[in-house]
């Protein structure tokens, strides 16, 4: 069997980002495999996705713990037991405490459906629509002890249209999430990420061309 590093993916729902990561791994586009899928919800569809690919799964139901810290301590145990080299939050809808963040410093990635630092927390697409921005997008970032405040690895942008609903905007953003999460994981394992204060620098990454988009483009 391969000696590829492994990642633990934490999901609460559909797990379409998990699926994108599994697919990228199976196609050899990222140099690692998903070693375990963990969910706080027994009925999360992400668990079924994992099983379908022969990946071990584990449910850690937050309702079974008196405090967030106790829940996180159990997550740490399960992740350590799996031997994962990286933890990926993929639609994991729990706020994590320093108990887990300090256990895996700079080793937890999260994906968020907005261009951070705008619209953190829940309902990123809904917040963007309500504000009236004309571009939004998604962000993969390392977890720190704030809510969606950690060092940013990759972002992608999408236009917002006047007739968008929260669902249509979220769906447009999700397409980009599926592209940038595997990209961020590939960069993590490339060894080219360096931290400078709160910034992530990517060694040897070619600059994308300068561009200018307007929305509307009238
Ligand atoms: C994704 O859009 C992800 O960015 C978002 O939940 C969705 C999960 O989809 N996460 C957050 O809003 C975190 N605050 P998925 O289960 O199909 O990957």
Image (cartoon, rainbow, N blue to C red):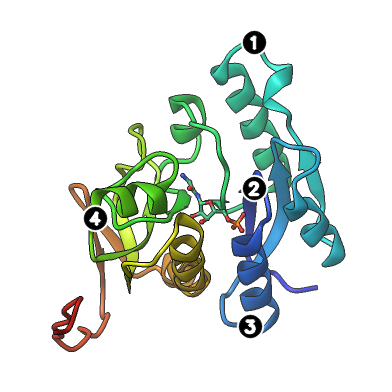
**Distance of label 3 from label 1 (alpha carbons):** 41 Å
With 60 as the anchor, is 175 left or right in this view? left
Identified at 80% across, 38% down, the residue is 42
With 122 as the anchor, is 22 left or right in this view? right
Q: Quadrant of residue 216?
A: bottom left
- Label whose residue precedes the other's in the sequence (2 or 3): 2
Query: How far across and down, in percent of the image, does residue 52 sit?
Result: 86, 65
Badge 1 vs badge 4, beta-carbon distance below 8 Å: no
Identified at 43% across, 72% down, the residue is 190
Task: Name the residue that disc number 4 marks.
Answer: 132
Task: Name the residue that disc number 3 marks.
Answer: 28
For the C terminus, which image quadrant? Answer: bottom left
Q: Looking at this view, is 180 or 163 the one in front?
A: 163
Badge 4 vs badge 3, beta-carbon distance below 8 Å: no
Q: Residues within 10 Å of mark 3 (few under 14, many from 20)?
A: few
Residue 208: image tag = none
**Distance of label 2 from label 4 (alpha carbons):** 29 Å
SS class of the residue under badge 1? loop
SS class of the residue under badge 3? loop
- Label whose residue precedes the other's in the sequence (2 or 4): 2
Q: Is mark 2 within 8 Å of ligand 1?
A: yes
User: Measured along the vertical axis of the image, is residue 160 above or below residue 76?
Assistant: below
Q: Which residue reaches farthest bottom?
A: 209
Q: Looking at this view, is 181 or 138 the one in front?
A: 138
Identified at 23% across, 59% down, the residue is 133
**Distance of label 2 from label 3 (alpha carbons):** 22 Å
Query: How far across and down, in percent of the image, does residue 53 sit?
Result: 82, 67
Task: Name the residue that disc number 2 marks.
Answer: 11
User: Measured along the vertical axis of the image, is residue 66 above or below residue 26?
Assistant: above
**Distance of label 1 from label 4 (alpha carbons):** 40 Å
Q: Quadrant of residue 48?
A: bottom right
Task: Name the residue that disc number 1 marks.
Answer: 66
């Amino acid at each position: 069997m391969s000696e590829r590093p492994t990642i633990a993916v934490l999901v609460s729902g559909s797990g379409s980002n998990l699926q994108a990561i599994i697919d990228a791994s199976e196609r050899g586009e990222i140099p690692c495999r998903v070693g375990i899928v963990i969910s706080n919800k027994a009925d999360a569809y992400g668990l079924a996705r994992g099983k379908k690919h022969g990946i071990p799964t584990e449910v850690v139901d937050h309702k079974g713990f008196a405090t967030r810290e106790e829940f996180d301590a159990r997550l740490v145990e399960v992740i350590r037991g799996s031997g994962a080299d990286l933890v990926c939050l993929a639609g994991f809808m729990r706020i994590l405490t320093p108990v887990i963040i300090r256990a895996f410093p700079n080793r937890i990635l999260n994906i968020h459906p907005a261009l951070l630092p705008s619209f953190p927390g829940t309902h990123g697409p809904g917040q963007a629509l309500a504000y009236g921005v004309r571009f939004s997008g998604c962000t993969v970032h390392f977890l720190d002890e704030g809510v969606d405040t950690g060092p940013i690895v990759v972002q992608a942008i999408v236009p917002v249209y006047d007739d968008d609903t929260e669902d249509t905007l979220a769906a447009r953003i999700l397409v980009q999430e599926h592209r940038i999460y595997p990209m961020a994981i590939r960069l993590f394992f490339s060894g080219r990420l360096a931290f400078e204060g709160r910034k992530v620098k990517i060694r040897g990454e070619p600059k994308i061309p300068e561009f200018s988009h307007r929305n509307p483009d009238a």
